Amino acid sequence: MDFNRMNQREMALALNLDQGQISRYLNGKMSPSLQRAKLIADYLNCSLDELYRLINNKSTKDQIIEFSIKQKERGKN
């Protein structure tokens, strides 16, 4: 299974969003509404500023997923 797709699916399920929406956000093809951006930022355990920096810098999916994993690990400590 593709790790990127698995995380997109997990994120979509956790946020009650379509996986296609998550993919479009991560690929920079679509910007989330403020409400959805807050949900995603909470899921990634980051600020809205950090989230938009990731999206606007056209970070790769791998960078966003790596960021997400680090943030979740930080939250466990």
Image (tube, grey):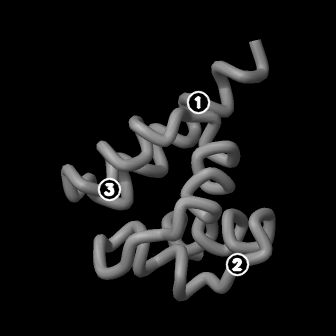
Which of discs 3 and 1 lies nearer the camera? The answer is: 3
Residue annotated with mark 2:
17
CA gap between label 1 and label 2 equals 21 Å
Residue annotated with mark 3:
55
Q: Which residue does the image show at 70% across and 78% down from the upper left? A: 17
CA gap between label 3 and label 1 equals 16 Å
Kindly identify the amino acid type of the residue bearing the numbered disc 1: Gln
Sequence-first disc among 3 and 1: 3
Kindly identify the amino acid type of the residue bearing the numbered disc 3: Ile
Q: Nearer the viewer, residue 69 or 39?
A: 39
Q: Residue furthest front?
A: 34
Q: Position of residue 68 (x, y in %)?
A: 55, 42
Sequence-first disc among 1 and 2: 2
Q: Which residue does the image show at 46% across and 78% down from the upper left? A: 23
As helix, strand or loop, the secondary structure at mark 3 comes to helix
Q: Which residue does the image show at 37% across and 54% down from the upper left? A: 62
- Mark 3–mark 1 CB contact (< 8 Å): no
Q: Alpha-carbon neighbours of circle 1 within 10 Å: few (<14), some, or many (≥20)?
A: some
Quadrant placement of the C terminus? top right
Quadrant placement of the N terminus? bottom right
Q: Is residue 17 left or right of residue 7?
A: right
CA gap between label 2 and label 3 equals 18 Å
Kindly identify the amino acid type of the residue bearing the numbered disc 2: Leu
Q: Alpha-carbon neighbours of circle 2 within 10 Å: few (<14), some, or many (≥20)?
A: few
Sequence-first disc among 2 and 3: 2
Q: Is residue 26 left or right of residue 44?
A: left
Q: Position of residue 15 (x, y in %)?
A: 75, 66
Q: Position of residue 71 (x, y in %)?
A: 58, 30
Residue annotated with mark 1:
71
